[in-house]
Amino acid sequence: MTIPQSQKIGRPLMKLIRLRGWPILQQLHIEEQLLRTSSENWCIINDGTRKPTIVMGVSGKPAELLEIKPVLHDQVPVIKRFTGGGTVIVDSGTIFVTFICNKDAVPDLQPYPRPIMSWSSLIYNEVFQGTGNFHLRENDYVFGNLKFGGNAQSITKGRWIHHTSFLWDYEIRNMAYLKLPSRAPEYRSARDHLEFICRMKDYISRSDFIDRTIRTLGTHFSVEPEELEAIQSVPSTKFSPSSRLLATQEIESALFKVESPKSLACSLSP
Amino acid sequence: MAARMLWASRAAGYLRISVPHRGFATVLKDLKYCDSHEWAKVEGSSATVGITDHAQDHLGDVVYVELPEVGASVTQGEGFGAVESVKATSDINSPVSGKVVEVNEELSNSPGLINSSPYEQGWIIKVDISDAGQLNNLMDADKYSKFCEEEDAKH
């Protein structure tokens, strides 16, 4: 996929890293490192992650968001990431696309959540042109009223990251690990997971989606491929990532929080 | 309409509030401001710090605040915590350098105080200032109002 040289003039540079099956925790660490220590614009595309993993936002509470017993029983890893937003379960059917930009990379874009979210929807409007009934609905990407892409961001003084997990495919049984969140978009209308989401693969192939995304980016940025090794070979000694895997004890203590009000009620009842 | 505007500007002057001509954000006259939209209320060698009305308005409903530990050091212009709103975490940068002596624990239960009362109940940290000279790097209310107007006009 090459962009003619003539089209590259005048557009800011964006480095593109393409991964396949990369562990999501490592992806998050790379992203946070690039956000905090790089001065360049980046796009990271990770085509699937091998192990099914639950990923919560920065303020996520396991007791409120997860079905703790099956999570513990099935030893599903739970990560708390550095960006805001909700909880997802990701696996090999998830495609991750991340933009990391300097605040002046996009002309006239204010570095706040809603403008960045709107800008991202313009990009994906182009990607999905002629495919499904795509829009940004509240803060989700949907076909009609079915969600297929969840977004999250982090904004620093001079830079921002916007990353998306796209449900190209998913396992029904994995959705059972997640509770209906108390903070849900209005358009969800209390639908449970399986009635609320859809599979991207019913609309577009994996390779088509990734190719179209790169092509669309190329009309806004001068995109240059970069190898992950080039970043990893320059460790940043000042930086320590905040995304982390929750320890089993943390998840077990969440089970106690869920169960103790119930045992109190039992002990008080006649 | 003109009489109401005159009344409003007189009331604003009495209350030490400066309301920008075109924007809706409130700016308080006695505070100092930095270009990442935090404010500092300096009292002797201490400062109370928060984010401005302009910032909270642009961020949306705050649902979570990441607070530093008491005793942590803060550096002018650098991040010390974050707020979560919409689906984003946004860094909060300190307008002063020094040591955190108090954090607003109320924000853990009521993060929305940052939206409803950004200059009063939504204060975030109190700092013992280590370098008073750095206060000269901050904007006064008029400069900050103008800064916000210019920033919003660009977009």
Image: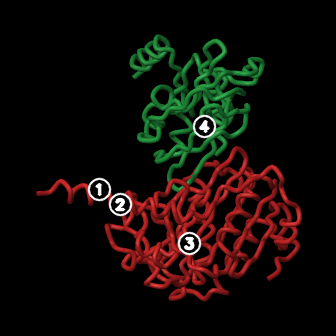
**Identity of the amino acid at label 1?**
Pro
Q: Which mark is residue B69?
A: 4
Q: Which mark is residue A258?
A: 2
Report the coloring of the rendering.
by chain
Q: Position of residue B22 (x, y in %)?
A: 54, 31
Q: Chain of mark 4?
A: B
Disc 1 target residue: A261
Tell me: residue B63, above or below residue A124: above
Tell me: residue B65, above or below residue A40: above
Chain identifier matching the green colour in the rendered picture:
B
Query: Quick one: label 3 or label 1, which is nearer the N terminus?
Result: 3
What shade does chain A have? red
Q: Secondary structure at mark 1?
A: helix
Q: Position of residue B40 (x, y in %)?
A: 61, 24
Out of B97 and A163, give the one closest to the viewer.
B97
**Identity of the amino acid at label 4?**
Glu
Disc 3 target residue: A77
Quadrant in the picture for residue A73: bottom left
- The CA span between labels 2 and 3 is 19 Å
At x 39%, y 19%, the residue is B4
- The CA span between labels 2 and 4 is 28 Å
Out of A14 and A47, give the one closest to the viewer.
A47
- The CA span between labels 3 and 4 is 28 Å
Residues at discs 1 and 4 both on one chain:
no
User: Answer yes or no: do the residues labelled 2 and 4 have beta carbons within 8 Å?
Assistant: no
Q: Neighbour class for label 4 at 10 Å: few (<14), some, many (≥20)?
A: some
